[in-house]
Amino acid sequence: MSLLTIAFTLLFYFAGAVLLAGLVYRIRLYATTPTPLRIPTTPAPTTAPGVVRRMFFEVTLFNSLFKSNKWIWLFGWIFHMALLFVLLRHLRYFTDPVWSWVSLIQPIGKYAAFAMVAGLFGLWARRLLVDRVRYISSPSDHLMLALLVGIGLTGLGMKYVAHTDIVAVKAFFLGLMYFDWQPMPTDLALNLHLLMVAMLMIVFPFSKLLHAPGVFFSPTRNQIDNPREKRHLPTRETAAGETSA
Amino acid sequence: MAEFETPALRPYPEIPPIEIGVMAHSKPFYAKEDHQQKIGFPGELIDNWQQAAVDKMGELVDNSRALRVFLDSCVKCGACTDKCHYYIGTSDPKNMPVARQDLFRSVYRRYYTLAGKYFPSLVGARDMDQSVLDEWYSYFHQCSQCRRCSVYCPYGIDTAEISMAAREIMDSIGVGQKYCNEIIGKAQTIGNNLGLPEPALADTLEGLEEDIEDETGVTVRMPLDEKGADILLVTPSADFFAEPHVDGLIGYAKVFHQAGLSWTLSSHASEAANFGMFIGSYDNMQKLALRVREAALELGVKRIVFGECGHAWRVAYNFLNTLAGPFDFLDPNYPLPQHVCEVTYDLIQRNALRLDPSANDDMVLTFHDSCNV
Ligand code: HEM
Ligand code: SF4
Ligand code: SF4
């Protein structure tokens, strides 16, 4: 086995473990931390189905963000939807035979990559050009965008400029999953792409990317507005919690 | 009618460019030693306050899912940056909700996150030091805890929760704000924020009864500490004292009178405005809330009604049941607590009030639901 293969094999096991363990740890913390008081923000639903509806539109359509700022909403929503399709499209490297619905969305996923990079550039432009957003940005905020843009551009490069050996890539990842290790092809674009993906996986549980699980646990959004009818108590066994109240 | 210079309505809001530091000088008076000690905080800045503040921060985050999720989740998208009236009015970027949170988050990151421990400048993490404390004191008191920013944030990040936590940490190391802390001490000993003792209250109410009789010719009672009444009315103490708040109280008395409801005020719980919330102190807020419970039990009432006050109503509606409940000794047919506007609206719907629209028809009126009833 080449050094490259050994390095990438170890890297992906490490990254996968960090991502999984980190997220499990973080989500457990969110779930078990008490909520001393009831603090939903207006207009708050007064029933559990109402809360489910509210969360659904928050997560799929970024409802509050739409009310808040149309440009951020536009770029942010395009980026996230595109990211979703891109990720789903990548499932074909991890399933054999490829699930039929994954094959079905391949064409969408192909173009979603452009939308994803465009959305990211839109967000980055705001971060650089709007004085208020520039003020609140730390180096890590720029690096996060750079990382995602880097992943997107190397990915697009492999798709549209210089094809990589995707059969070998798939063999590598299936090999990781079934502990039957296969060689990693030597291809600069591919190696960079995968290196950045591993980095993203590793920083995920330590960074603002925690907004993805976080949004589900936000008490101002997931609590039912019924403090008079039902006495709110700080702790409850159930995890995501308040919706089941 | 008075002449007003009405600002022109603009089709789009104008967001001012940032002006760094213009409000750094603004801060409230510091609480004195006895204000602090009376409500359970150290009288002056303690030794080793940096570590104590960091420890307190950890304790608060461990006990608040809101804080924990909010501190982790902000993506710095900037959607909230133009949503705070303190920013729009002053242009100071530290009055942008996310920047206000970052005053807190930068310290949290430094001591409680891996990235902040090892790469502080990468993620904007800072040590807890005097300059941070000064900024906290200034900018966490330039937040009215209105929660407007929370409505607009994609994750509902509520800067008010963070302001409250920061104030609680500052109190715990001996740096308090005079206005709130002095008032809480009064409410916990005398029963209301203004420090009006029972004889003064009785005297005021008697005067108001006379005013009503002079004005309308009707004898309307304003009972105080009357055992066996059905309703306990808890209202901000400004209602006993200040114009035009007192007109509100007179109005409540007239409504109860005409509807034939039996009611009383309490000298023990003569304050609706629970300032424990402003300083983020659960313990102090609970002590004040318990006075309402004690008064209700002592007087044997069946219902609790709150007078108008946006922030009183937040504590009453959202927190009272948690802080001082369960209220199973009250009549379950009425919400606990009930807002005086709810009571009045209900009476109007049932035609239990005779209203004379001509009495105020020289004014153009609108109802501002500042309490979010
Ligand atoms: C439940 C899933 C998710 C939800 C509801 C969600 C929602 C949001 C929202 C509302 C924003 C603010 C608007 C914007 O700047 O785009 C945002 C920002 C961001 N999200 Fe997500 N997100 C999710 C998952 C993810 C994942 C899985 C990633 C990355 C792998 C990600 C990466 C980012 C980044 C990097 C930003 C900041 C963009 C900037 O710097 O301006 N998100 N997210
Ligand atoms: S809107 Fe929310 S996520 Fe965006 S910068 Fe403000 S606090 Fe952070
Ligand atoms: S809660 Fe504080 S930071 Fe948020 S909008 Fe209101 S005053 Fe501004």
Image: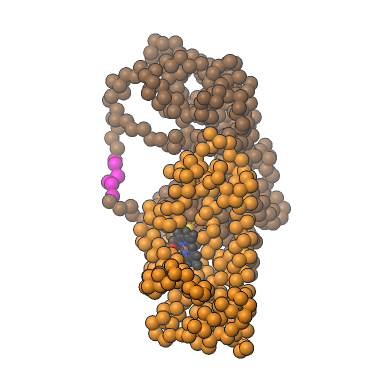
The residue at the point 60 percent across, 73 percent down is A15
Q: Is residue B183 above or below residue B123?
A: above
| Residue B140 visible in the picture | no
The colour scheme is by chain
Residue A16: percent from left, percent from top: 60, 71
Magenta span: chief secondary structure: loop
Residue A242 vs residue B92, the one in the foreground? A242
Q: Residue at x 40, y 26 (%)?
A: B345
Task: Please tell me whether residue B108 is drawn above or below residue B339 in the rendered image.
Answer: below
Q: In which quarter of the image is the N terminus of chain A?
A: bottom right
Residue at image location 51% in from the left, 38% down from the top: A226
Pick the front one: B15 or B347: B347
In the rendered image, the vertical position of residue B120 relative to residue B326, given as above or below: below
Give residue A236's position: percent from left, percent from top: 62, 45
| Residue A232 in sight from this viewpoint | yes
| Above/below status of B343 relative to A215 | above
Question: Quarter of the image holding residue B51?
Answer: bottom right
Does B208 lie within the magenta span? Answer: no
Q: In the image, which lettered chain appears brown?
A: B
Residue B202 lies left or right of residue A119; in this view the side is: right
State yes or no: residue B7 in magenta.
Answer: yes
* Chain drawn in orange: A
Span highlighted in magenta in the image = B5-10
Task: Kindly identify the residue that appears in the image at 56 percent across and 31 percent down.
Answer: B193
User: x and y percent of residue B336 in the render?
Assistant: 53, 29
Q: Residue B194 lies in what quarter of the image?
A: top right
